Image (spheres, grey):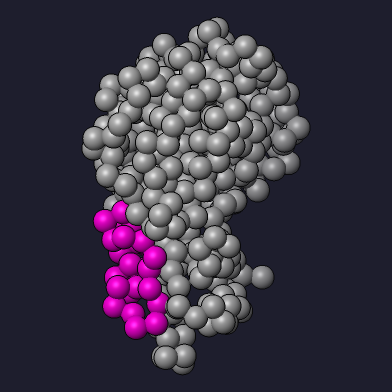
Amino acid sequence: MARVYNFSAGPAVLPEEVLKEAADEMMDYKGTGMSVMEMSHRSKAFDNIIKEAEQDIRDLMNIPDNYKVLFLQGGASQQFSAVPMNLMKNKKAAYIVTGQWAKKAYQEAQRYGDAVAVASSADKTFSYIPDCSDLDIPEDADYVYICENNTIYGTKFKTLPNTKGKTLVADVSSCFLSEPVDVEKYGVIYGGVQKNIGPAGVVIAIIREDLITDDVLEGTPTMLKWKTQADADSLYNTPPCYGIYICGKVFKWIKKMGGLEAMKAHNEKKAKILYDFLDESKLFKGTVTPEDRSLMNVPFVTGDADLDVKFVAEAKAAGFENLKGHRTVGGMRASIYNAMPIEGVEKLVEFMKKFEAENA
C-alpha cells in the first residue's frame, strides 16, 4: 500500500525518513539489543536520548539558559490546569479566547481563580484574531494566556499581544517549531507534540525558571507542580520514552532541513499554494480573515454541505486523507504541518481544480 497524503490535524504526518530510521532501530537501538520501547528510563542509553533531544530543541529555538525544557504527559489539556495551579499567585489571570482550546483553558482556569476574558473572536466563529495592542488587562493579573495557532479555526497570532508587562503563557501545540520564535517574550511556551513533532503522548513545556517555584495553589498534585518535574529533569516518573525518542529524531530532521528559518520558508511556500488557489477559486472559499491565516491549518468550504461531503469522500478515494473539517466549522480542513511535503499540497490543489471543474 502506498503512503497517503495525510492532512490530519493531529496525530499528524511525520517525516518519512524519521519513520524509516525508527523502523530500522525498532529491534535493536544502537547495539543495545533492545528497542527504545523496552528500555529503562534510567538507562545510560535513554539518558543520552533525552539529553540530546533537549539540547537539540534548545539549539533550534535558541532557548536561553534561564528556561527549563520539560518533557511531560497528559496532553496540552492537562496544562490548562497546571498553568493556573503554578502561576495564579493573585488568583487572577487574563485570557484571550480565539478558539476552542483557548476557551477550554479559560474555563479550566475559572476553577482556580478569577480568569477574565480580555478579548475574544467568538462573535465571528473564531475566524480572526482580535486586536490585542491595548487590552484591559487587570493590574493584578498573574499572566496573560493565548493559544497561538488555532488548529480548528485556522488562525494564528502574527503579533503577540501587548501584555502590559504581565507574563505571557502560550499554547503552541499546532505551530510548534514551524517558524523562529523569540522565547524571551514568553514566560511559558507549551504544546502537545502530536501535530508537528512526534507521536501523541508527549507535551513539551518551556518555562522561565523564576516561574518554577514551590509556591503553587493549595491542593496542586505533586505531578502537576512544574518544580517536581524540573528538579527531576523530566524523570520524576517514567516519561513517554518512545515518544521523546521520536521527537529527538524530528529535531535532528529540522536541523538537517536548515532550522526554523528554513522551516518557515518551506511552510510559507506550501501555504501560499493553497491560499492562492482558494482566493481565486469560484467553488472553494477560505474561512479566515487573510491577515490572520495560519500556515499550519487551512479550513475551507464550498458553501454547500452536501458538496463538502462529496469532496471529502472523493478526496479520500484519491489518496488525500483526513480532510473533513472540525464539526464546529464544517467543510474541510487541510493541516499542512512541517512534515507535509510541498507536492502533497500541489497534488491537493490539482485535485481541487479537477473537482471544481466537475462540480461547478
> Taken as a whole, is the magenta stretch helix, strand or loop?
helix
| x 57%, y 45%: residue | 194
In the rendered structure, does residue 94 fall within the stretch colored magenta? no
Residue 256 at x, y percent in the picture: 39, 43
- Occupied quadrant, residue 39: top right
- Left/right placement of residue 161 relative to residue 208 reads left
The stretch of residues the image draws in magenta is 266-295
Up/down of 69 relative to 248, above or below: above
Relative to residue 104, is residue 40 drawn left or right? right
Residue situated in front as seen by the camera: 42 or 289: 289
Of 160 and 239, the residue lying toward us: 160
Image quadrant in which the C terminus is located: bottom left
Which image quadrant is residue 2 in?
bottom right
Classify the position of the N terminus by image quarter. Answer: bottom right
- The answer to whether residue 231 is left or right of residue 36 is left
- Picture coordinates of residue 60 (x, y %)? 37, 34
Q: Residue at (51%, 70%) from the top-left corner?
A: 331
Residue at image position (49%, 80%) is 304
- The reply to whether residue 343 is visible in this rendering is no
